Amino acid sequence: MRVRLFGWLLAPVLLATSPLHAADYRIDPLRSHADFGVRLLWLSQVSGRFEQISGDVTLGAQHDMAVVDAHIVVNSIRMDSNRVRRWVLAPEFFDVEHYPTIHFVSEPMPLTALEQGGDLLGSLTLRGVTRPAHFRLLPSRCSPNALQQCRIEVRGDIQRSDFGMTGRRATLSDQVSLGLVIAIDDARP
């Protein structure tokens, strides 16, 4: 009986002092997307658009920094050709059966970068491989005081071989252009 009573008395204290970090904002999946492009035979571009992104934006203690945590559903990719879509979802590329999501977590970034643009560093997990990622945050009309209506655009390049995508090296470039368009919505009730 004493152990239970002690547990019930201690629980509110632990909850009050533990750093529970709920997301301040969420990524609006209806207004967000990601795209990619890779050179085919150095003449044309193979491109696609991921329609399902979810995640959170969490502010730092002083509310002057933010961390973006985004999950992209690989099977949500839309492409002009169903044949090419099946090809990029296959094991030699995205391997959607074993790796259904792509995950990006940014390092803390200053909220002022939303308006001014700048470097966005973080880690990208693709096909079960996590690598440092360096993207460019494009300037926007985001106000750090009104993030609910913010739309963040990020661009950058990765090497597909860094993530185990080594197939078709004679026909596809190793460099892949990536872009994220993230609309922010209030996560608080």
Image (spheres, helix red, strand yellow):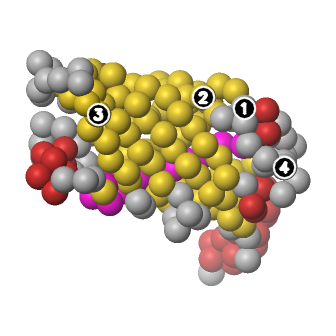
Judging by the rendered image, the residue that carries numbered circle 4 is 143
Disc 3 to disc 1: CB gap under 8 Å = no
Residue 105 painted magenta: no
Q: Quadrant of the N terminus?
A: bottom right
Residue 2 picture location, percent across and down: 66, 75
Q: Which residues are magenta?
A: 66-77
In the structure shown, which secondary structural element does the residue marked by tag 3 occupy? strand
Does 166 sit above or below residue 31?
A: above
Q: Which mark is residue 117?
A: 1
Viewer-nearest of discs 2 and 3? 3
Disc 2 to disc 4: CB gap under 8 Å = no
Q: Quadrant of the C terminus?
A: bottom right
Q: Amino acid at mark 2?
A: Arg
Query: Is tag 3's residue or tag 1's residue first in the polypeptide sequence?
Result: 3
Q: Amino acid at mark 4?
A: Ser
Judging by the rendered image, the residue that carries numbered circle 3 is 45
Disc 2 to disc 1: CB gap under 8 Å = yes
